Amino acid sequence: MNRRKFIMTSAILPFSANLGFASEGTFEITRTEAEWRAMLTDLQFAVMRNEKTERAGSSPLDKNYADGQYICRGCDLALYSSKTKFDSGTGWPSFYQSLPNAIGTKEDNTLFATRTEAHCRRCGSHLGHIFDDGPKPTGKRHCLNGVSLKFVKA
């Protein structure tokens, strides 16, 4: 993604409408809206359940490079290993690969483009998006919202 497109997208994200929601679909772990609201902050709920995006640079997990795993805040499923984390320069925690059977994906047609949305395969919580501009060996960049994750040291 070039710098101009990144800046434009970052400016639009907080105001974008969402056509789909993470809570749609059939998942192993389900909760009512009231149960989700009781366990999440307003920002966590907006991101994880309504597919909003946290402000770039706001997550302390972006600069965390300790050994461990990143797990879903909604259900504690292990999603990413610290071994696949890299500094993408975008202001969001980024990984080149998820753990096996950890995430689900769906097409996201918001922001006048088609992107690949990533969500927890067990509870459906929105994590972020996957782009084709990451490092080897996958060439993918899983650009995630830190509020959707918890870090567990090894």
Image (tube, rainbow, N blue to C red):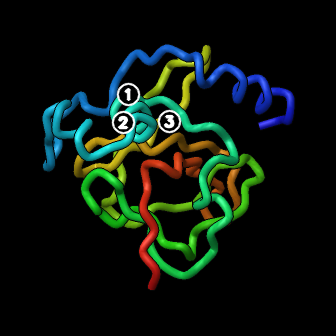
At x 37% / y 44%, what residue is drawn? 119
> Which quadrant of the view contains residue 78?
bottom left
Neighbor class of circle 1 (other Cα within 10 Å; few <14, some 14-19, many 20+) is many
Neighbor class of circle 2 (other Cα within 10 Å; few <14, some 14-19, many 20+) is many
Query: Which type of secondary structure does the marked residue at label 2 adopt?
Result: helix
Query: Which type of secondary structure does the marked residue at label 1 adopt?
Result: helix
Q: Position of residue 8 (x, y in %)?
A: 77, 23
At x 73% / y 55%, what residue is drawn? 88
User: Could you give the CA–CA distance between mark 3 and mark 2, rounded to whole angstroms?
Assistant: 20 Å
Q: Amino acid at mark 1?
A: Asn
Label 1–label 3 contact, CB within 8 A? no
Query: Which type of secondary structure does the marked residue at label 3 adopt?
Result: strand
At x 45% / y 68%, what residue is drawn? 151
Q: Position of residue 30 (x, y in %)?
A: 14, 42
Q: Which residue is mark 2?
A: 45
- Specify which label sits upstream in the sequence, 3 or 2: 2
Q: Is residue 108 left or right of residue 3?
A: left
Q: Is residue 38 left or right of residue 67?
A: left
Q: Is residue 111 left or right of residue 109?
A: right
Q: Is residue 48 above or below residue 136?
A: above
At x 38% / y 41%, what residue is drawn? 41
Q: Which residue is mark 1?
A: 50
